[in-house]
Image (cartoon, helix red, strand yellow):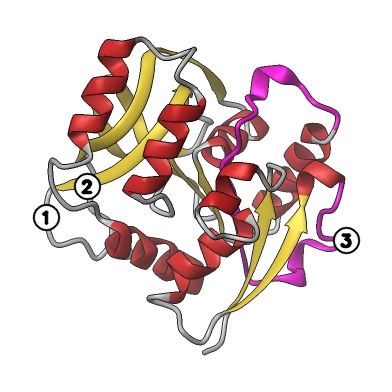
Amino acid sequence: MRIRFGIIVCEETTPLLRKLGVGSRARLYEDWLGQVASKANFKTYLAYNDRLPVKADECDAYIISGSRHNISEQLAWMQPLFNFLRITAKAQIPVIGLGFGNQAIAHALGGRAGPASGWSIGRHTWKLVRDEGWLQVGGKTVSLFAFSRNQVVKLPSRSIRIVSGSGCPNAAFRVANHSVGIHGHPEYSARHIELLLAEYADQIPEAAAEAARTSLNDGPIDVTAVANWAAHFAYRG
């Protein structure tokens, strides 16, 4: 079966992405998903430029990207995105949100995103608290890179917490059978985190930045496993 993913991008192409040799943020998700869904097709929508699917069923499933923006900024392009997420939820179309995307899902469907107790940066390991068939995981934890000051602080109704950990109780969740939110960034590399640390050096306490740098060498991250999560969830939809 060939699946068509819509990648909804919530951030402009930045100099940081160019340093990574990536022409657009959408390419990060294509490369990440492409390793497990080689027959997938991708279509990009620039939400920040008021470009969203005209019809929810233009694609079989959607990825909502991360962003340097926060829900609290209430930028003009965000409300149409929230409306679209309500439409896909009603239509039972699979949506996977990462970082900002996971906060957008929560906000749109009646939950809430807000400031965390501190920066969530570097490699984090969270506990799998609910094993579902589509996850197909090989262990009881999941490790991903993160870079955020915000997180989902209240889940929408009909939500199931899937992954949880110290400082981030809602590290991954499912809403009914249509939406999944993931706090971390499986599309990020250690180099990506290093560049972000340099870019935000004037905002991040040095102790937090140093801990993040050290964490980058703590072990592998579950990039492929989480790509499989997304692909399996999309296919089952």
What element does badge 1 sit on? loop
The residue carrying pointer 2 sits among few (fewer than 14), some (14 to 19) or many (20 or more) residues within 10 Å by Cα, namely many
| Mark sitting on residue 54 | 3
Which of the two residues, 88 or 184, is positioned nearer the viewer here?
Answer: 184
Residue 144 in picture, x, y percent from top left: 29, 45
What residue is shown at x 38% (from left), y 76% (from top)? Answer: 36
Disc 1/disc 3 C-alpha distance (Å):
40 Å
In this picture, residue 52 sits left or right of residue 146: right
- Which secondary structure type mostly characterizes the magenta part of the structure? loop
- Three-letter amino acid code at disc 1? Gly
Estimate how packed mark 3 is, as few (under 14), some (14 to 19) or many (20 or more) residues with alpha carbons within 10 Å: few
Marks 1 and 2 in Cβ contact (< 8 Å): yes
| Percent x, y of residue 40 | 55, 81
Q: Is residue 131 left or right of residue 203?
A: left
Question: Relative to 60, is 181 on the left or the right?
Answer: left
Give the amino acid at mark 3.
Val
- Which residue is pictured at 27% across the width and 33% down the height? 164
The residue pinned by badge 1 equals: 139
Question: Distance between the Cα atoms at labels 2 and 3?
Answer: 35 Å
Q: Which residue is mark 2?
A: 142
Region in magenta: 50-76
Instruction: Single out the mark in the foreground, 2 or 3.
Output: 2
Q: Position of residue 149 (x, y in %)?
A: 46, 20
Q: Who comes first in sequence, dot 1 or dot 3?
A: 3
